[in-house]
Image: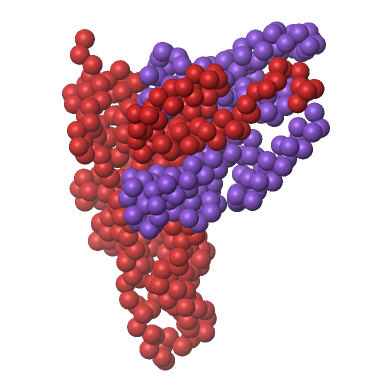
Chain colours: A purple, B red
Amino acid sequence: MAPLSNDRAQWLAACILPHERALRDWLARFAFLSEDQIDDLVQETYAVLANRAEVASIRAPRAYAFQVAKSILLQELRRSRVVAIGSVADLEALDLAADMPSPEQHAIGRDELNRVARAIAAMPRQTRRAFQLRRVEGLSQRDVAAALGLSESTVEKHIVRGIKLLMQQFGRGGKASSDASMTIDEGRSLADDRARNRAEH
Amino acid sequence: MKDDRLPTTARETAQSIDEAAACWTTRIDRGLTNEERAELQDWLTGDSRRVGALARARAIWLHADRARSLGALATQGPPAVPIWQRISRRAALFGGGALAASLAGAVALPAFLHRRRRLETAMGEIRRVPLGDGSVVTLDTDSLIETAFNTEKRGIHLLSGVAYFEVAHDPARPFVVEARDVAVRAVGTAFSVRNVADMPVAVVVSEGKVAISHLAGAGEPPVQLGANMQAILPLETAALLPAGVAHALSPADLARSLSWRDGMLAFEGETLGEAAQRFRRYGRPTILIQGKALAREPISGLFAASDPRGFARAIAVSLDAAVEEDGDTIRLQAQRP
């Protein structure tokens, strides 16, 4: 099943994930979209990419992901009559090419790798150890449990937490924490921010 | 949420979907039970965003192992200061100043000042280490250097591998790197030296200027190499020919030839055979190219040195080759028509 295959996840990791930040920034330019709606759109975009029968024919993954996000957004906007027609027209007129990266893709690769490393380094100690032993050193979850003297279910919880922290790094939390460390406490305040955002809407 | 203009009523938040996706990713990683598999199917069909969230979580999870190529940074947190470095910093205190120079004739210098210190990296490891005099060395995978600093000279012997030196300015003590039969002499500059078996010694200068000479060639004028230049020294010992060994590098070529410092391997038109050989220096699995025509294919791109698998897969897609993994070996071969 394509959406769950390792190959597809690898492709997403290599071709789409590095551009998620740019995609979110682009979506954020539409003032009528809330952060929650951007999150929804990003998930829907990944869903389309995950469900595709094949991805080998996609020559420009970044442009394709932007295109997918745009068409989902248009669909949503047309379905909900409340939106001013103007915003749909604006959106359709938007030149996606203007958002294409410079040919200097190398810098993205490095920044991004550093971002992942920083996010891992900033994880709470036990989470970081479990995460590193599994993902970086390649031990199985069971072996990680044995190595740390923890139960397997505790290791599982740490790994879930590690993934969530990295998700934040790639998602809306990324900007705030890209220059410094990210802790669980910051994660909590992020949730507070979200609540505040919602209240303002 | 009632003011939201997109219909989001009674919708699960993206955040809670992400949480569930992180849990499923972890469970998939340890292996699902049959019940969980059915549960996962149910969960996925409940909302179209869930498939996307799970695919994204799995991509993030797989992506995290790219941090491995950052070596010590990712695995050990802040690097501990090795004992030899603490010693050498003290050595620099004693040995670096004019006071020490004036004492040198009268007082025997402490023995550790002359001791050779070894510094090495394991396969797949990339390390950046201060040398105590303000200079910093970055060692590529599987590399070994010995340092011998004294009051007249900062000597480095590159026994094997690749090292990049950022040299602190000190005209009184030239910084000299020896590799095989050549010496590269610098005052304040940044440059890399490669000494890998079966390949010519290569020097790349990113800042300042160095002078390259043969260890045996007394009287021979050294080759001067400036910033953004590279010298490939002949494998067979011969007289140095300045015209033949030194070339200018474009900024892109310079960045590419030093990309290993970020744990990345950059290729621009190298053959697949050469690329596979470079991956081999960073550890397993080993990539074998079957068929001479495929091995000669030129390739381009930036790849994590620690991920030969990812490299092989990417190459297979772009060259339409088949990948086959067998234990510690990855075979790439042209697709049969």
| Residue, far front | B35
Quarter of the image for residue B118 reads bottom left
Q: Quadrant of the C terminus of chain B?
A: top left
Residue A131: percent from the left, percent from the top? 44, 48
Rendered-image quadrant of the N terminus of chain B: top right
Which residue: 23% across, 31% down?
B325
- Residue at point 41% right, 41% down? B65
Q: Is residue B296 above or below residue A84?
A: below
Between B101 and B262, the one lying in front of the other is B262
Q: Position of residue B315 (x, y in %)?
A: 33, 25
On the image, the x and y values in percent for residue B102 come to 48, 86
Can you see residue A172? yes
Q: How many marks?
A: 0
Report the side of A152 relative to A110 (left or right). left
Where residue B265 appears, as percent x and y from the top left, is: 38, 39
Can I make out residue B227 in this image? no
Q: Which of the pair B107/A96 is nearer the observer?
A: A96
Residue at (64% x, 35% y) in the render: A172
Q: In the drawing, does residue B312 fall left or right of residue A158?
A: left
- B106 w.r.t. A57: above or below: below
Image quadrant assignment for residue B313 = top left
